[in-house]
Image (cartoon, grey):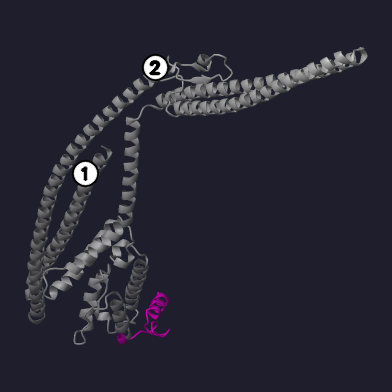
Amino acid sequence: MRQDVATFLISTGFEVAPQMLQNITGKDFRAVFQHLILYFDPLWPFKPEQRFEESFMQALKAMKYPYLGQIDIKWLPTPAAMHSWPALLGMLHWLVELGRAREHYMDSGHPTLQDPALIPEEFDDIHHHLTLAFDHNSRAYEVFLQGQDVFPEEEKMLEERYARKDARVFTDLEQLRERLKEIHAEWEQLKKSAPPFEELKKDNGSLRRDKLKFEEILRRFEERKQKWTRLVQDEKTELEYNLANLEKMRAEEQRLSDIVKVQNLSPEEVLRMNTEHESLTREVESLKHKIAETSQVVVRLEVSLTRKVSDAEEALDQYTSLLSTLGLFPPLPPPLEDVDLTIDLHSAAANPQGLLSGADIRKVVKPTLSRITEMKRTAHADVESERIRVDDELDQLNLECETIEEEVLEVMNKTNALSDQADELREAAQQEALVSNAEASRLERDLAAARTAAMANGVGVKSRLQALQIAYREQVEKVNRLKEDTVRAVIKNSSDIVAFKDEVSKQLQYLREFAEAN
């Protein structure tokens, strides 16, 4: 025990010699005892004019030493005696153990230390709330002692501390509200939209119609390819036929020349034949010239025909593209599913009436297009009417929103009234606490006077002193109870106001979401 006491005294800054505790004097014992007591309470009133025996017993009572009745104040002048030192050393060792427990507790960071610096940013422990409340009341009481009745700075500090506590919670809450808003919007969209199966059926029908349209377009281009292939083949066949005729004519000319050489004709016959040959040659040249002119005219007509056919085919391609773009390619939507608006061009037809195949332009295409135009115009008028109806409903919702905002304003006014009532209650509690503090101060003065009188008059006023001590403890308990009630009332009113503001915010958010969704 001596070793533990010496080690603790050295660790707390008290210079002690190793042999001092083996044969301690009354002066050293008093110095060690006062050092240990001041370690626990630096403001403990050790008075030089007061006898050590009195301050010794008061200090041990304050420390709630459990074996106080086993110590005799007559041992204090000679603490190293054999009959007194074991009990006094045990008392010192108990104070040392209590000091170590205090160090462990002060370094533990426990919430009951009521140290605002140890409070984390986010907390839920009731001791942390009580720590902030005690710190706020202490600061406010210091300001109150300086003559002020309002504490805006202290209240602002407390509000900022709780705002820091709730910052991340509010951030998470806003994110969750945004997520909930998105989920509500998605849910409303899903409820308004058709089932996925219906959408898939609709897409399937659309894809099937597109497939039929593309198959029809491919069939048309395949027919056009085959047509041009046949035209090229016909041209090749005609070219081969003309080359064969040319060879035949050359062979016939050679045969006729051989026959003329073999025949024995007179000069007159030769002259006549030459004359006929020249006339025939001129006729042949004239015919060739006419044939050449006719060929040129035919070529020009063919070029013009090819150009016009190309223009007609481009016009038909544009017409077909417009049909595909407007969704009028067969099959058409009801009630025109039996109508086919496609038109084909047959440029090789001998009859002009057979150039176009498919729907009749005058009897089918134009009336159908007029009917479709009228249907689209009617649909546009219906959509415009629906838009006007939706605008009217939106105006009604805006009026309802304004009405609800007025109700919310009334609720906020009621909230402000409740806040004023809470402030009045807090002021009343503070006034009552002031009265209680004044009564406690008076009782302390009476108790001090009673103690002085007791010391002067002896044991005769001991009963009055005990009565005053009991009244003092009751008054202190009453003051503490009023402080706790005030703190709880402030915290409860603050929590109610915060909860009410949250509820009002939720209602306004729900109203905004409802207005935006409609």
Mark pair 1, 2: CA separation: 52 Å
Magenta stretch, residue numbers:
1-27
Residue at 43% across, 18% down: 361
The quadrant in which the N terminus is found is bottom left
Which element carries disc 1, helix, strand or loop?
A: helix
Locate residue 135 relative to residue 452 in the image: left or right: right
Q: Which residue is mark 2?
A: 336
Rendered location of residue 406, percent (x, y):
13, 46
Q: Quadrant of residue 430?
A: bottom left
Quarter residue 155 falls in: bottom left
At label 1, the amino acid type is Gln
**Magenta stretch: residue 369 in it?**
no
Q: Is residue 23 magenta?
A: yes
Q: Position of residue 328 (x, y in %)?
A: 43, 23
Tell me if I can see residue 255 in this picture: no
Image: 26 above or below 460 = below
Looking at the picture, tell me which residue is in the foreground, 52 or 12. Answer: 12
**What label sits on residue 507 in the rendered view?**
1
Q: Can residue 193 be seen by looking at this rendering?
A: yes
Q: Is residue 486 above or below residue 40?
A: above
Callout in the foreground (1, 2): 2
The amino acid pointed to by label 2 is Leu
> 269 left or right of 461?
right
Q: Residue at x 9, y 56 (%)?
A: 421
Return the residue nearer the eye: 150 or 267.
267
The quarter of the rendered structure image containing the C terminus is top left
Q: Residues within 10 Å of mark 2 (few under 14, many from 20)?
A: some
